[in-house]
Image (spheres, rainbow, N blue to C red):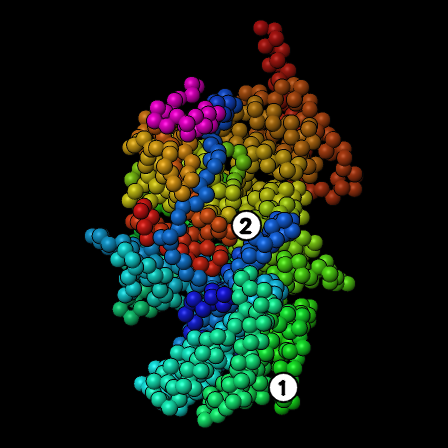
Amino acid sequence: MASSLCRASPSPVDSVCITSAFSHTDFHQFCPSTGRIYQCKNTCKALVDNSCRPKTRTALPKHGLFMLGRLVQVSKNYRSVIRACMEDMHQAAVSARDPALHSQYSTQVSILSAMELIWNLCEILFVEAAVAGPLLLRLLDWVRLHVCDVDNMVREVLSSENPSKHELFWNVVDVFVLQGRMDEARHLLSKEASANPTSVNMCRILDDLMKKMPVPSLGNTQTLTEMELKWQHWHEECQRYLQDGTFASNSHMESICKILLGDENAILEKKELMTTWYHFLVTRLLYSHPTVKPMELRFYAQSSMDLFLGGESSPEPLDTILMAAFEFEMHQVIKECSIALSNWWFVAHLTDLLDHCKLLQSHNLYFGSNMREFLLLEYASGLFSHYSLWQLGVDYFDHCPEYGRVYLELHIERIPLNTEQKALKVLRICEQRQMHEQVRSICKIMAMKALRNNRLGSALSWSIRAKDAAFATLISDRFLKDYCEKGCFSDLDLIDNLGPSMLLSDRLTFLGKYREFHRLYGEKRFSEAAKLLLMLMTAHIAPCSFWMTLLTDALPLLEQKEVIFSAEQTYELMRCLEDLTAGKSDKQKFQDDDVETMKVEMLRLALARNLARVIVKEGTLEGS
Amino acid sequence: MASPAPPGHAHCPASLSLLARRRRAAAANQQRRRQAGGRSRREVVVVAAARAMEDVCAKFVSQKVSKARWRPLPAAALQPPDIFATGSWDNEDNRISIWSVGDLGSVGLNGEYQGEPQLLCDIRHSGDVMDMQFLDQERVVVASSTGNVTIFRHHQNNQTLSTNQRWEKAHYHVDRSASCGGAACTGVICNNPEVVTVGEDGRINLLRADQKDAVRTIDNADSSTLHAVTFLRTTEILTVNSIGQLKIWDLRQQRNEPSQIFSLTGDRVPLHCVDRHPNQQHIVATGGQDGMLSIWDIRQGTMPVSLLNAHEAEMWEVHFHPSNPDHLFTCSEDGSLWHWDTSTSVAEKPSFLHQGGRSTTYFSHNTINQSLVSAWLSNDPTKDRMEITNLIPNQTLSVNSLDILGPCLVYGTDAEAIYVNRHLFA
């Protein structure tokens, strides 16, 4: 059942051998920059989101069974994603012309297939936690799904005109028997029986034995004791047939009978058909310990590996990982995978899943928060270092309760911002998470960039968005400086539309108001303009350095035909002028050029004349 | 303002009582706002969980998609569009790709093609693809974050793409000759052979497909970033900028100033996209940074006719359906794609029951404008409602672009996938 999901989809990678995955490749070629691998990560991310929701944690004790089903489903989804990725990679390998590229893709396929093998075993042992009985069935499915070297041979024999005459016929029967695929084996036997009348009897007996072989049930229909009892009977029956030499005339059938009896040597003779020690382990369990308990697995696994390898070769990384899984050493599995795979995807997601199964809680790291978070952080950091995958990393950080936010804060500021649109996307991420400090810093970066490019309007917009008063002041000064130099404002569309954001900084307020003065003046609304101008000085909105400019701006108003400034306003203006000149030390005065002195003189003259006119006017008005 | 009785009250009182209450509340709200001197700004309260997506096919493309555009159909074509182009962003190696959803052999249950889009050809593009428009059946104009504007030609006989024309650094900051002096070109619009581009440098370029030099350039057209551009008439263009302004430029005038400026009230929310009603050229829709949809009547006022609170984040694109403009489509950074339908408002009285799996929201459509039949502007609350459907239920990453032609919708996302729905009105 565990494999139904994967078997349902046609798998073009059948021909790829798992054992070879580790013999001629190293995991380190699993390069993180390969876009294709990430494609599957995209999908996986959605899964981790699903399984990471906090409600999962609280809900587990209450609805244990329901949750278990969900977690198994999540685990299967992960595997189907790996499978899909494998298919894509396989397609790419097939269509690749360049031999180097082809071998690179093939390597990826073998690595992915090894990942799926490990994941599947972890699913059976840890996530699903299959108990004695069903455990063996799951392991059989696992072996059938992953040992696919022989599938080509099976296909060849079955498609031949006369299968029983094919030279590999008995190999295929053996394969079926070794994998516990009794129905298929019996089907082939019937072919042999019809083609070879002399062996009909033998075939019938063997067929009968195969038919009667008791298998553990998935449901609760029989107890383990019942099963063991039946199995004992069947075992004795096989023993009898072997001892009375029923199959003596046919070595093939005799060896099959020996396999049925769980004869280790007979099984080991078929080493080539099993290809791996874990196939040998499962076959051995099937015919000698069908009701193996999870905790007993480690002994059989160890001895199976020793027997199978027979001291000829040392275990590969994959063997070590699988062995650790059979020993229920979860942390060892994660550790070995971390070493063997150069990429964090596998361990991060597997650990996350196991953590949700409440399997990793006893273990505390002496650094960081826990292993799940540590690995997710590592993986997400890897995504952030990638050119375009940083957006995915955000979600992973969100699911790390302890350090996720800090990591995100540190990483997000380092994303290169080449366009404003990208900056907006990054800002949105920060704003959604109330990361004000980062918002400020990103806006500041953008404002600085705009300023460097002489885009004062954009720079101001960015600093307004960041609510960065100091920077707004700086830019306002640039605007005012530009005005002083050129005599006209640039970026009017912006300054005229500052609205409430004008209040961000004093200088910006001044800029907005000063521009308003110009507008009023331009619209010939002189008295309003005059009032505003005076207010800018008396209310100390204008910076002192700018007073001279303002007073000079007052000159044309003073020289208008009609009187604009009232007597009181004129006094105020005079006071402003005196404050300005008095504030300067003698030394500064001495340094001032003639233009400045002349300006002051002109202003004094204009003010005096205006005062004279206004006194006359106001006197006349009152008098009349 | 009296709260109007909703239509169809007699038919299904049970479901309507709730709706009526909501509507009455909305009307009261409206009144309050009016009294406060504000414009009508409506809240879209509950919006569409989802609609069945069985008609949609997805294709994962291993690159973040920034733009997706249908190839225009020849004038007399009756069949639905089958070719579209996409552009990617934020990759080391960005690409322009041409896809086909046409019948390539496999036929679905209903006799229709069900398969995913097939890649016909692609070509490398330097910089992020910021905008993309088909010039004609063969040529597509692409705006780049490097400031380049490029025309690519799709050779349909041998399925290849080639560069047809390129304006290096059509948009630039201070120093055009400097290696990194380019400024992102944010928007492009075509009216063969004319091409208008806008950029982060606040510049407007008027180009001709067959001329190497720009026909006209308006430097410093905008002090802030120009985000999008569209044609209002053959000689007038509309631009939106990052301080919430909509500007009309008359290209016949030599003055380098807009002929009209519209702006959102006070809050200066950046506008990201703009589209014009295909038949009634005075109706313009824009989308803003806060996800708000604004409808403008450019014949009157300087403020939007109505503001509709829509998405939760930046609205990246807004499109009127080209031949069925009662329908509008918007997509957003929040990962949603909305279908706004006003066609039910005048024509029929819809049943509020029997909505099946499609949970949708109706709300009254109050506007300030009068005397116009267009559902987008009219103000009769008894008649007008919009049906809004979120076409993407569970997406989390941004939907950057969409295009709609005939019954076909295509959209591209930051989740590195493109989606095609060929039976939009089914």
Residue A572, given in percent of the width and then of the height, sits at 69, 24
Residue at the (39%, 25%) spot, across then down: B13
| Disc 2: host chain | A
Residue A500, given in percent of the width and then of the height, sits at 58, 33
Residue B22 inside the magenta-drawn segment: yes
Residue at the (67%, 30%) spot, across then down: A537
| Disc 1: host chain | A
User: Is residue A383 visible to the viewer in this orientation of the structure?
Assistant: no
Q: Which mark is residue A390?
A: none
Which of A551 and A421 lies nearest the eye of the viewer? A421
**Helix, strand or loop at mark 1:** helix
Q: How many marks?
A: 2
* Residue B138 appears left or right of A324: left
Asked if labels 2 and 1 touch by Cβ distance under 8 angstroms, the answer is no
Label 1: few (<14), some (14–19) or many (≥20) C-alpha neighbours in 10 Å: some
* Residue B284 appears left or right of B147: left
Residue kind at label 1, given as amino acid type: Leu
Residue at the (33%, 35%) spot, across then down: B344
Which of A250 and B127 lies nearest the eye of the viewer? A250
Q: Which residue is mark 1?
A: A307
Residue B44, given in percent of the width and then of the height, sits at 47, 35
Residue kind at label 2, given as amino acid type: Leu
Sequence-wise, which precedes: disc 1 or disc 2?
A: 1
Q: Residue lying farthest left?
A: B76
Q: Which residue is mark 2?
A: A424
Residue B353 inside the magenta-drawn segment: no
Magenta stretch, residue numbers: B1-25
Q: Residue lying farthest top?
A: A624
